Amino acid sequence: RDTPVFLLGQLLGGMVLAGPAVVMNGTSTCIVEPGCVATVTEFGDLKVEVNVMVKAASSVSAASSSSPDAVQLSIFNNRFMGIAEQMGRTLQRTSVSTNIKERLDFSCALFGPDGGLVANAPHVPVHLGAMSSTVEWQ
């Protein structure tokens, strides 16, 4: 099955792309999987809604859908850790503070919508105890 490829800069606001599709720009590539729908916002961003076209009543049993897939869990764990580590490297590289640049005295982490810790970078994680409560409060 052929998959259409789009350049994000050439898509207009309000355009809707049904998966499968590939949307590229200068620095990234977004894969819209089958059953998903991507909408170009008025600001030129891509909003992807997952499994919109898949019916709620699926042939998958409730027991198997409630247990996480080990491979997918590992993939997303590594992705989230990579994001947190990249945040730390960027902060270290662009900082003028000796404490941040040389001593790595900072924390970078990703949190879920409920404020729970998802992934943290292996720097000095002394701040992470308070960060979760702060993010939850916001």
Image (cartoon, rainbow, N blue to C red):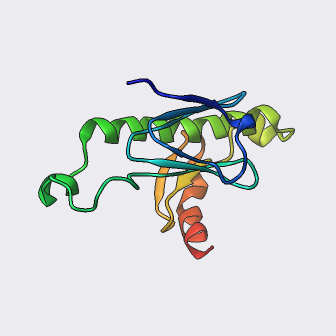
Quarter of the figure that contains the N terminus: top left
Quarter of the figure that contains the C terminus: bottom right
Which residue appears at 50% of the width and 34% of the height?
A: 21
Residue 118 screen position, x and y as percent:
46, 52
Q: Is residue 27 above or below residue 111?
A: above
Give the left or right position of residue 52, taking residue 83 as reference: left
Give the left or right position of residue 5, taking residue 62 as reference: right
Which residue appears at 56% of the width and 57% of the height?
A: 128
Residue 5 screen position, x and y as percent:
57, 27
Which residue appears at 21% of the width and 61% of the height?
A: 57
Residue furthest to the top: 2
Q: Nearer the viewer, residue 99 or 77?
A: 77
Which residue appears at 41% of the width and 41% of the height?
A: 77
Residue 62 screen position, x and y as percent:
15, 60
Residue furthest to the bottom: 137
Give the left or right position of residue 103, taking residue 127 as reference: right
Q: Nearer the viewer, residue 104 or 74?
A: 74
**Tag count:** 0
Q: Is residue 111 above or below residue 79?
A: below
Q: Quadrant of residue 56?
A: bottom left
Q: Nearer the viewer, residue 116 or 57?
A: 57
Q: Is residue 30 above or below residue 58?
A: above
Q: Nearer the viewer, residue 94 or 41?
A: 41
